[in-house]
Amino acid sequence: MNESSCPATKTAAKAHALPLFSLLPKRLSSLVSLCASVLLLSSCGGGGGDGGGGGTPGLISGGNNTWQAGVYKPSDNFKNYCEKPRVGASKITGIPFPDRKGNATQEKNFLRSWSYETYLWFEDLPDVNPDNSDTPQNYFRRLVSDKKTPSGSYKDNFHFYEPTESEEAWSAGITYGYGLHLKINWEVPRTIQVVYADSNSPAANNNVKRGAKIIAVDGLNISTMNANALFDALYPPQINAVHEFEIQDAGTNNTRKVILESASLPTEAVSIAKAIDHNGSKVGYIQFNTFIPDAQDQWVTAINSLKNAGVTDLVVDMRYNGGGYISIAAQVGYMIAGANTNNKVFYQNVANSKMPKEDPWGFVDVGLYGLNKSLNLPTLNLQRVYVLATEGTCSASELVINSLRGIGVSVYLIGDTTCGKPYGFLPEPNCGTTYYTIQFKAVNAKGYGEYSDGFIPSTTDNGMDRVKGCSVADNLTYQLGDSNEPLLAAALQLRATGICPTASTRGQQKVSVDVEQGELMLPPTRRLMIQDR
């Protein structure tokens, strides 16, 4: 491992069931149940429930708790005191539940104190009386800054929670569903299209491919279906859910019906890794979907394969990668750039004024998980990399871009502006719910980390938010990894000629209106940059 080494990482297995979804790039709300509902944050820090932030300061009784405006007891005083304590142990990790009998006010007192202790913008937090009628989850929704950036967007677009079991399942690489990844256009007539399907999934086994449109579910047209019922059918929160889908495959006018049964699936972090012959040399291509612990071994396999193939350049397709663990990002950076990362800073954690300053993280050159734990990682030792991106490229994905640029590795960005999330979390489980509040900002070795409006493909690189590359629309007509797929084709052309495809060239490629307007259906819980503990 490099001298600027990574902090100790989580050893407990964790992770995900995909029960709830948001649409990028809307402002996220909390997740409120296992049904597929989406709430946009329309009022943060006020309104609803008793004793809101605008109440008269005073001393209020709350069971075994007291509240006084501006006075915060240590969060440890309230942690794991639960209104409905769980019994037994997690079926994902096997760790016994720490819950003790308490009440909802204690749960809210915990959230109030913990947020004030750790939130990056704690000075913006409303002080809401926890002895009110809110559920702990709805109370947590209030504990967020409502300030806006100069561009007019909220400072905090990423405040949410999820069932702890879902968080544990995701980190453990478990997904419930059909292996479908989708885009949706809500305009009438509503359209839903497949962006890709996981290998060996129920969807793939029924030949459902990128570009297919979902026309109806269980005999009901998607345009007339209730949104909750539609989400529940598309992403069931359990296995063995059976639904009939009427689909129209890309390039056809006819529809067909398929029966899909949800299953517990291994998360496919790396879907494709291959060498492409281009202009007399070999270019590596990796479709990379999520930064979970299992991604480490999948990247090791991919890099070894590409090294054996003799690739001299690399295209990393992160157009649908919402992020994940910083430790995996630090490994990915090393496996791309190798010796160029020696003794270099991967990122610096900038927390609030109450938190002690941490040492910088270095790039990670040894395995931290799985089959390659404690083994040296392979690397391509590249001084440049081509990244395919969309608004679905978020968080830890953006961290890789920023960190490599911070040490002088040339990054070329092809596609669209990324989601804009330089912020991270230390997920906090309490009483069966895991809460995510922004606790730090990540800056690179050059001190840059203000990309809250995303990285933008540009004709020049300003070392900040504008990254040299090509602006190209995502096009579902072509399969991922196809050299003719517009983003990949643009990367290959830029590499060979230094010139992006022209507008007329792009105009020759078939792009449907609903592809351009569709938004990636991505769980808000998976737009993450998690600092491993």
Image (cartoon, rainbow, N blue to C red):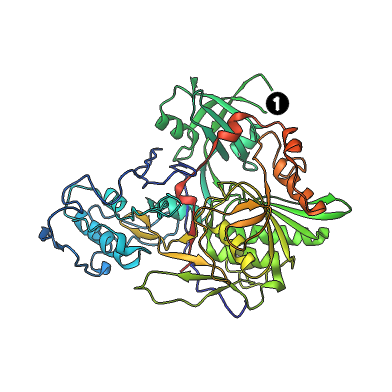
Question: How many circles with numbers are drawn on the protein?
Answer: 1
Q: Is residue 317 visible?
A: no
The residue where tag 1 is placed is: 251
**Which element carries disc 1, helix, strand or loop?**
loop
Q: Is residue 47 visible?
A: yes
Q: Quadrant of the N terminus?
A: bottom right
Looking at the image, residue 478 sits to the left or right of residue 421; the answer is right
Looking at the image, residue 507 sits to the left or right of residue 140; the answer is right
Looking at the image, residue 112 sits to the left or right of residue 256; the answer is left
Residue 192 image offset from top left, x and y in percent? 55, 31
Judged from this view, the residue extending furthest toward the bottom is 3
Residue 232 image offset from top left, x and y in percent? 44, 34
Identify the image quadrant of residue 316: bottom right
Residue 426 image offset from top left, x and y in percent? 42, 63
Identify the image quadrant of residue 106: bottom left
Q: Tell me which residue sits at (50%, 28%) in the image.
A: 243
Position of residue 94 relative to residue 267, above or below, is below
Identify the image quadrant of residue 507: top right
Position of residue 17 relative to residue 205, above or below, is below
Q: Tell me which residue sits at (40%, 32%) in the image.
A: 228
Residue 22 image offset from top left, x and y in percent? 45, 42
Residue type, label 1: Gly
Which of the two residues, 519 or 177, is positioned nearer the viewer here? 519
Which of the two residues, 292 or 5, is positioned nearer the viewer here? 5
Q: Residues within 10 Å of mark 1 (few under 14, many from 20)?
A: few
Judged from this view, the residue extending furthest toward the right is 280
Q: Tell me which residue sits at (54%, 53%) in the image.
A: 454
